[in-house]
Image (tube, helix red, strand yellow):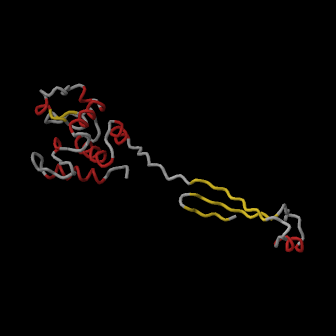
Amino acid sequence: MKTKLLGGVLVMTMVLSGSTNLANATNEQVYAKSAPSTAEAIQPVVKVTKVEKPKNKICKNWLVKHLHKHGFRGENLREAWAIVMRESGGNEKTISSTNDYGMFQFNHYAHKDASWWDSKKLLTRDYNTQIAYKKSKGGKTWYMWDIDGHGKWKAEWSPRSIYERYVSWYNKYPCK
């Protein structure tokens, strides 16, 4: 039997020469049967099996799954994950000493008058993530977290050490 991969298709070929049972044959019979006569038809048997491309790996990290469920994709998903890990470690119930709420740490003083501000709802994963998705324009702008749309530090209101924590988490992304 021979196997060959041709353009994503696995081809297996086997050459059969009549209905020879070689298990009980003598050496002379085997020798005689090893070269089929013209009367015996040589029939190639070809089995074609399509080889599937491997599917995208499914990340098992709960936070990545959660962020993906709420619309973050690709690089924006990785950035969102790194921001959440930097801000709260993924704890949706976090309220910082500076009154930042939830996983993405929305600041109470900066946003308390916004129509979307709800202190209780911001301490839930779903609502906090929905607001982050909207405020980041689907993960394209992270200005509220002092990061531009390309993952670079804007240096407007946070020290470099905060940005370096983001970079550290970004490099630890669990689903490469």
Q: Residue at x 78, y 65 (%)?
A: 42
Say which quarter of the image contains residue 19.
bottom right
Look at the picture and state if 59 lies above or below 132. below
Which part of the image, by quadrant, shows the N terminus?
A: bottom right
Q: Is residue 170 left or right of residue 53?
A: left
Residue 99, percent from left and from top: 15, 33
Residue at image location 15% in from the left, 46% down from the top: 146
Which percent across, then down, holds residue 85? 27, 44
- x, y (%) of residue 28? 89, 74
Q: Nearer the viewer, residue 31 or 161?
A: 31
Q: Nearer the viewer, residue 99 or 153?
A: 153
Q: Quadrant of residue 77?
A: top left
Question: Which residue corresponds to the image point at 16% horizontal and 51% vertical from the top-left?
Answer: 153
Residue 90 image offset from top left, x and y in percent: 29, 39
Taking 51 as reference, is 26 left or right? right
- In this rendering, the answer to whether 124 lies above or below 147 is above
- Position above or below: 33 against 93: below
Q: Report the number of numbered marks.
A: 0
Query: What is the quadrant of residue 131 in the picture?
Result: top left
Front position in the image: 102 or 127 = 127
